[in-house]
Image (cartoon, rainbow, N blue to C red):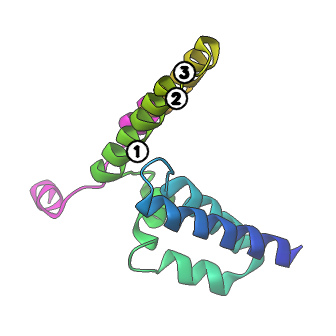
Amino acid sequence: MKYVWIGLGWLFVILGVVGIVLPLLPTTPFLLAAAVCFSRGSQQMHHWLVNHPTLGPPIVNWQTNRTITRKVKVVALLSMSGLFGISVLMGINDAILLLQGVVLIIVGVFLWRQKEPQTQTESEELS
């Protein structure tokens, strides 16, 4: 089972990295899923992912504080809007568009309502 978790972890890492360059593919959810898979399959790979300079910060923000940066929120919302726009242009069935729109709105509201990490200035003001 260990190798299944590791394989799934790498699949999610690859999807997350592809999501960095493809605006319609979300990065952070795939990286979070990869972290969960690696934590069950290989502590060494989990440690590598969480401490990676580019891939690690969104995972750490979510795992430690349940926070999402404003940049990640904006990119996710723009990606979801782009996905919906493409669906409209493709002439997808109205019922499917309605379902897709409802799901994207729910996810968008969930994302936007999540706390954002405090900036250095904000932390100094609170001290």
Mark 1 / mark 2, whichever is N-terminal:
1
Left of 30 or right of it: where is 36?
right
Percent x, y of residue 106: 50, 26
Q: Nearer the viewer, mark 1 or mark 2?
A: 2
Q: CA distance from mark 1 to mark 3?
A: 23 Å
Q: CA distance from mark 1 to mark 2?
A: 17 Å
Q: Residues within 10 Å of mark 1 (few under 14, many from 20)?
A: many
Q: In the rendered image, which residue does mark 2 sit on?
A: 87
Q: In the rendered image, which residue does mark 3 sit on?
A: 91
Left of 59 or right of it: where is 47?
right
- Which residues are drawn in magenta? 109-127
Quadrant the N terminus occupies: bottom right
The answer to if 116 sits in the magenta stretch is yes
The structure residue drawn at horizontal position 62% and vertical position 16%, both measured from the top left corner, is 93
Q: How many marks?
A: 3
**Which secondary structure dominates the residues rendered in magenta?**
helix
The local secondary structure at tag 3 comes to loop
> What amino acid does circle 1 point to?
Ala
Q: Is residue 13 above or below residue 44?
A: above
The local secondary structure at tag 2 comes to helix
The local secondary structure at tag 1 comes to helix
Q: Is residue 114 visible?
A: no
Percent x, y of residue 101: 51, 22
The structure residue drawn at horizontal position 18% and vertical position 59%, both measured from the top left corner, is 123
Percent x, y of residue 80: 44, 37
Q: In the rendered image, which residue does mark 1 sit on?
A: 76
Quadrant the C terminus occupies: bottom left
